[in-house]
Amino acid sequence: MKINVKHVAKLANLPLSNEEEKKFEKQLNEVLSYVEKLNEKDVENIEETNQTTGLENVTREDINTICFAQDEALSNSKKNHNGMFKIPKIF
Amino acid sequence: MKPVIGLEVHIELKTRSKMFCGCSADYFGKKPNTHTCPVCLGLPGALPVPNKKAIEWCVMLGMALNCKIPHFSKFDRKNYFYPDLPKGYQISQYDEPFCVNGSIKLSTGKKIRIRRVHMEEDTAKLVHELGNQKSTRSTSSGQEIKNQKDEGYSLIDFNRSGVPLAEIVTEPDFDDAKDVKEYLQKIQQIARYLEISNADMEKGDMRLEPNISLSKDGKLPSYKIEVKNINSFRFVEKAIEFEIRRQTEILQKGQTPIQETRGWDEAKQKTISQRTKEEASDYRYFPEPDIPPIRWAKSQISNLKSQMRELPKEKFKRFKKDYELSDYDTEILTRETTIADYFEDAVRIGKNKNIDAKKIAKFIMNRKPSIEEVLPAKLVRNIESATTYVNINEEEIKITVKKVLKNNSQAVEDFKKGKTQALQYLVGSVMRALKGKVDPRVVIEAIENELK
């Protein structure tokens, strides 16, 4: 399996220089081939799962809890305006 | 060429709290960023815990749409970057949604297959503004006012972030905009009947994204266009019909439309390209490690089913049968539960007074009483007084009218000059003189005859 580092960088929202692209392409391919070792293991009789805690049905009742005050919510923002987070324009 | 249309509908659930935290989910018109906490702001280390009621409502919605409810289900992360999504992923459901394989029947008899109904969280609200406004900037020396000249920017309000959304996905079974509209009205009605959402499109409680393409040979086309930003029933048909025309033109030139997301622009009356559509695999879905999966016992599902409110189809059948109403009357009285409940309350009260359901139905439909102001008991009294006029013989009315007109010559003159209050006065006088209940329309007729 060969990695498309440009595509991965785009999905991760990371701007990479040409050198970085080469560097990470090599590293990521090494990681992939290392993880591929798992394929050598026989898992025929093992039940599939995607969690290890064994927990199920952890939910909460529909009850309100206390929220941040507006200034608290905004306290770590770089910029804000009219009680909202301010960011560079999207469109 | 035949249109091939599939629909994704998002319904915002009206739970008290958000999907994964206890912040209030009632965000509409509230002060920005006052319903937030570490979970819905996406702060590191916060632990999302799903809202039980939201999940139950999602399952009820699925059952109302004749879906199967798998005994095992889980949440997944859908990864993408956008400023309205603070975690960098949306908690959604990928391959094991709460409800699958449902269907709904339209009035034409056509069956629309429902592929799935799943649960996810809403995003924050973005406000786009053009610059030249003052903004406050937090610095180490306190707040500094900065004038931002001609610098466009966007603002984010996280009150909506994490509000529960149920998403209903159909198979591409529609081939015309009218069917889409009827389907949406049915979905809206079901959500309101179940009392799980206000499903108001203008307020954004109900949002739809049609996927539209055209098929030459009846097979599924190789592309599809997703249309967003349709926030009213009026726009649904227009947006779909515009897309069908636009794609027809491209295909007639021998080209294939580009797979992309477009937005409906009401001012320009057309759809406009927003972005080329990402492949599904780009979202890199994977199971949400913070939320253990859900497993239902059979008894839980049947319990939920028994808690479900009567659905539109069932109410329609029952009204027709129990009250012997026509299809038309039943359809109007069951369109909204508030009217249906009002009617049934009035029927219950009317029963003791020998006023039958048909009479009440007719009265509600003809007079359209204000449900908030005229309580059902008052409505029944109104029906009673409207129908129990004493039968006074015509001769007696005629004599009384003559007498009243003679004694009120000034009012008669005023009436002849066109003063309508004078007529009201005369009618009132006649009715008082008769002491009994008499239909004012009969009195007016008698007065007019007398003055001819």
Image (cartoon, coloured by chain):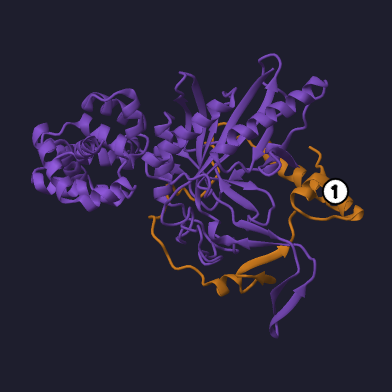
Chain colours: A orange, B purple
Chain under disc 1? A
Residue drawn at (79%, 20%) of the image: B252
Amino acid marked by disc 1: Lys
Residue that numbered label 1 is attached to: A26
Q: Residue furthest top?
A: B217
Residue drawn at (41%, 62%) of the image: A64
Residue drawn at (58%, 27%) of the image: B177
Q: Is residue B357 left or right of residue A63?
A: left
Q: Total marks drawn? A: 1
Q: Is residue A28 left or right of residue B436?
A: right
Q: Residue furthest bottom?
A: B141
**Front residue of this view, candidates B370 and A64:** B370
Q: Residue furthest right?
A: A18
Question: Residue A77, percent across and down?
Answer: 66, 70
Q: Quadrant for residue B66, please give it.
A: top left
Q: Residues within 10 Å of mark 1 (few under 14, many from 20)?
A: some
Q: Quadrant of the C terminus of chain B?
A: top left
Residue B448 makes an appearance in the image: yes
Q: Is residue B159 above or below residue B413?
A: below
Residue drawn at (63%, 33%) of the image: B238
**Front residue of this view, candidates B32 and B130:** B130
**Front residue of this view, candidates B4 and B265:** B265
Residue B374 makes an appearance in the image: no
Q: Is residue A17 left or right of residue B332?
A: right
Question: Residue B60, percent across and down?
Answer: 39, 38
Question: Residue B245, percent across and down?
Answer: 71, 26
Q: Is residue B233 above or below residue A65?
A: above
**Front residue of this view, candidates A7 and B13:** B13
Question: Residue B271, percent across and down?
Answer: 70, 38
Q: Quadrant for residue B270, please give it.
A: top right
User: Of helix, strand and loop, which one carries label 1?
Assistant: helix
Q: Quadrant of the N terminus of chain B?
A: top right
